[in-house]
Amino acid sequence: EGAQQGWLLPLGSAKPAAPVGKAARRAAEKAAQKEERAAGAGGRAEAREQLVGWLKVFAAVDKPGARLHEPDRLYGACEVLIGHAEPAVQLLALDCLVRWEQPGLLKHEKTLRKLIEDKTFRETLALLQLESDSDAATVDTADRPLLLPLLSRLLFSKLTQRSGRGSSKNS
């Protein structure tokens, strides 16, 4: 009977010397999942570093519309990356977009940078005025088609960030 349960196996056997209970199996599964998550986090960190490196390269290119292959794809990717969760990636994506030298974007670059930074986000957001009928509007009607998609991505990323007391996974 003991040999059938795996208790009396010879040394060096692949099976355990004692029967494994449910609790031990669950603990082993959790440990394996934890290792997988740690390996995945390393992969994500490595991918993030590559992304940051590529964005730095693209941000160094003057007039990318004339010099790069498929510049519209890069511009679209940078627009999407404005909505990235990490401010460092958002700033680099903005650096890339500024290289296209669009007047509306250049005019509001400083405001976008302040919105990306956590320290100046609230104050800048409070001062940002979008009304079309107001003379005090900080965003001109002509600049809206360019800026509103960027602003919505940026604001959505700030809205979905986890920070402060409610940042746990269960909240």
Image (tube, rainbow, N blue to C red):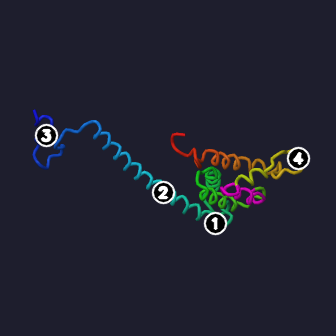
Is 118 magenta? The answer is yes
Q: Label 2 near label 4: C-beta < 8 Å? A: no
Compute the Cα span from label 4 to label 2: 45 Å
Compute the Cα span from label 2 to label 1: 25 Å
Label 1, secondary structure: give it: loop
Q: Label 3 near label 2: C-beta < 8 Å? A: no
Residue 63 versus residue 131 in the image, above or below: below
List the residue tagged with mark 2. Answer: 45
Q: Foreground mark, 1 or 3?
A: 3
Residue at left 38%, top 48%? 34
Q: Alpha-carbon neighbours of circle 3 within 10 Å: few (<14), some, or many (≥20)?
A: some
Compute the Cα span from label 1 to label 4: 38 Å
Q: Alpha-carbon neighbours of circle 4 within 10 Å: few (<14), some, or many (≥20)?
A: few
List the residue tagged with mark 4. Answer: 134
Residue range of the region highlighted in magenta in the rendering: 105-120
The kind of residue tagged 3 is: Trp
